Amino acid sequence: MASAANMNAVRETMDVLLEISRLLNTGLDIESLSLCVRLCEQGINPEALSSVIKELRKASDAMKVSESSKG
């Protein structure tokens, strides 16, 4: 099991990453950011992950526009 000190370090690191994410206007919430960090820790290329997130956002925005024009 992880020690309390280790858990505090992880929490502090995530807080710093979340603040950086907010400063850069990434739009990632803590859950999404945590998932991205875990994927990168498992070897996923961060640039590829960024590209996928951007494409998913574009597709989501396009779907929203399409749905609102039908209404």
Image (cartoon, rainbow, N blue to C red):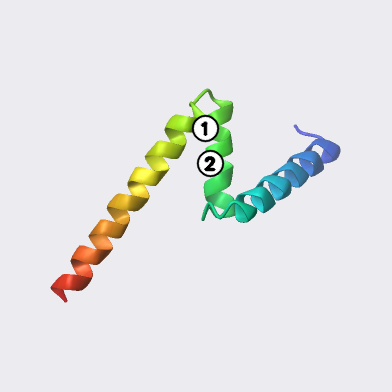
The image shows residue 59, relative to residue 66, as above or below, that is above
- Farthest-out residue, right: 5
The quadrant in which residue 4 appears is top right
Question: Which residue type carries mark 2?
Answer: Leu
- Farthest-out residue, top: 43
Residue 58: where, in percent of width, then height?
32, 51
Residue 48: where, in percent of width, then height?
43, 31
Q: In this view, does 16 lie to the left or right of 33?
A: right
Residue 25: where, in percent of width, then height?
56, 55
Q: What element carries label 1?
A: helix
Q: Is mark 2 on a helix, strand or loop?
A: helix
Residue hosting label 1 = 39
Question: Which residue type carries mark 1?
Answer: Leu
Residue at 74% x, 42% y is: 13
User: Is mark 1 in CB contact (under 8 Å) with mark 2?
Assistant: yes
The image shows residue 43, relative to residue 27, as above or below, that is above
Residue hosting label 2 = 35
In this orientation, which residue lies closer to the viewer: 34 or 24? Answer: 24
In this orientation, which residue lies closer to the viewer: 57 or 1? Answer: 57
